[in-house]
Amino acid sequence: MEGAAATSTSARSNSANNNASSSNGNAASSSRKFTIKPFRSYTQMDTSSAHDTFSSLASAMDEIHNRNASTLSFEELYRNAYNLVLHKHGGLLYEGVQDRLSVHLRRSGAKLVKLAREESAASGNGNGNGGGDQYKLLEEMANCWTEHRITMVMVRDIFMYMDRTYVPQHRKRPVYDLGLWLFRRVVWERSMEDDGNDMEEYEGEQQAMQMSMGNSGPLKSAENDSTLGTVASTLVLQVIHADRQNRLSDAPQRTSLLKELIHMLLELAHANAGQFNDSSVLGARGRRTDQQGGNGVDNIPVYERDFEEVFLGESQDFYRMESTSRLSHSVGLGGANDDISNSTNDNGSKPAAKYSAMEYVHRAQSRLLEEKTRAGLLDLPTQTKSALLRIVETELIERHAKTLVEMEGSGFSSILKVVASSPAVGSVAAASASGRLMMASPARGALGMGAGSRGMLGGMEPSENGVVIDRDRIADLAAMYDLFSRVPSSVNHLRDALSERIRLDGRALVRDQETNVAPPAAFVKGVLDMRERFAAVVSDAMRGEKKGQKRMREAFEDFLNADARAANCLQCTSTTCLGWD
């Protein structure tokens, strides 16, 4: 009992000590909560410190341009750029970034100008061999652009915080787009008269950069002076022209190079989209007079101005000249392989053209396929590709559609005349004409299609009703129709020729009845044979189009209803067949 009492007394003593200790702790804690510490003083970064901080960033940008980025701490660089913007030195940072980018781009531009001058001098002295050396400028331009893009990706990462805060607040270009814009102004639009000899010192580089972006700087308009861009565009067009003439030995490599340069122009055009306050960057130094930086020359799409417009114009001139030279004279029975001269032949007739109508058709189809393939390899924008194909179709098809139809000996009308066994199906004149055609040399063909063409009898095939149809000639008509269908308005010439052929053959049949050359039964058979042959033309060559069927029906109705003798022949034939005579 005494031990238990002692234990209880000890427990109460410990509990009291714990309560006292807890009270003292709570009191101490309460006293710490109400302690107010003084605020730490905020030190604003002064201008001198800001310049020192940017100097480290400028040195880092130089290392990136020199391909020494592996030695840099991007985390530290990002923090320095962040502090500059946080301490209200965003303007200093943005202008400094623009200055450093311009300095490096002007150095690259000076090298390209020097290279362009050397190539021009070599070409002027007759040392250009048309090989790879002639397009060295394009290769160096592409390399410069690739390196600049890689550089701008790393620079953009350093100044990411400035892009998110300072840039939108002050309507500036994002850092990456700024780099593209400067590449256009400082490299692509650099005057060929600007050799960059004033770039030895940094201050000289800054001043030259400022002048190049001002209205009175050395960077002149393409209208008044040649620029790197115009020289490069001319070389690009020369590559394409050589490829069209099949004179490009390393076409895949050249095409890949051109594709990269076209992508460059498209990206440069994208960087110029929008309204940006560029004037304030140079306005403080009194250099820039354009107060609406995003307007004026900067908003001219560089791709459309320096490539697309010139490319489409050159393409139009090329195909206009080529198509005109191939169809300068009509093709006679002598074929397409005869020599062409400006003088007349011994009999006083015009010399034959380089190509017959069908050879021209196949050449035009090949050209259209080539241009479509080339546009795909160059990865041209949809608008450029569509405009290019429209130009080729206009120059190769629409401008010469009527000539191809009417070309003597090989045009659509001449082939159609053979298919229909003209001059009059079923008449004595037609029989004699067919005899003359069968005596023609199979090696050259009755249409003068050349030694490689099919003979007259090669594609003859009787129909179910025993009517002989020239399937080879119908295939030729189909090729011409397929080409003309690219320009729907040109198909009207084919329909007109079809209608005219039906009317001429039908009237010839009627005239045979007038002179009693053939009996009425021959007239009816001739009309039925005509109907089957021309139906084959419309269904196979003209792909069964509704307008062609309508024109054929109207042509038959025209000559059948124009003379009462046609009705008399039908009546006599019906009476004879039914045995009513």
Image (cartoon, helix red, strand yellow):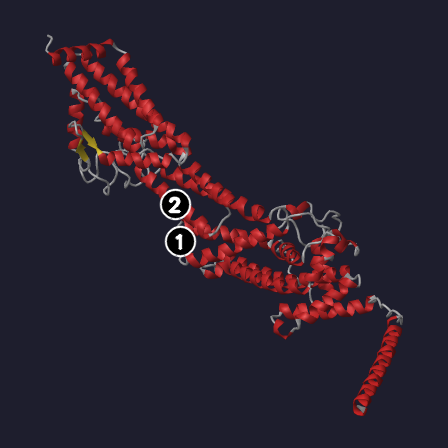
As displayed, is residue 60 above or below residue 9? above
- Observer able to see residue 491: yes
Residue depicted at 30% across the width and 23% down the height: 552
Q: Is residue 401 left or right of residue 5?
A: left
* Quarter holding residue 398: top left
| SS at mark 2 in the image | helix
What's the amino acid at mark 1? Answer: Arg
As displayed, is residue 195 above or below residue 389? below
Q: Is residue 412 left or right of residue 45?
A: left
Instruction: Please give the residue where the numbered disc 2 appears in the rendered image.
Output: 369
Which percent across, then down, holds residue 202?
72, 66
Name which of mark 2 and mark 1 comes first in the sequence: 1
Q: Residue furthest front?
A: 1
Q: Residue furthest bottom?
A: 3
Residue depicted at 26% across the width and 27% down the height: 535
As displayed, is residue 264 above or below residue 390? below
* Residue 20 or residue 481, whichever sits in front: 20
Q: Count residues near mark 1 (Cα–Cα under 10 Å), then give few for <14, some for 14-19, many for 20+.
A: few
Instruction: Please give the residue where the numbered disc 1 appears in the rendered image.
Output: 247
- Observer able to see residue 354: no
Q: Is residue 394 left or right of residue 97?
A: left
Q: Is residue 534 left or right of residue 108?
A: left
* Residue 487 or residue 391, whichever sits in front: 487
Question: Which corner quadrant holds the N terminus?
Answer: bottom right
What's the amino acid at mark 2? Answer: Leu
Which percent across, then down, holds residue 86?
77, 63
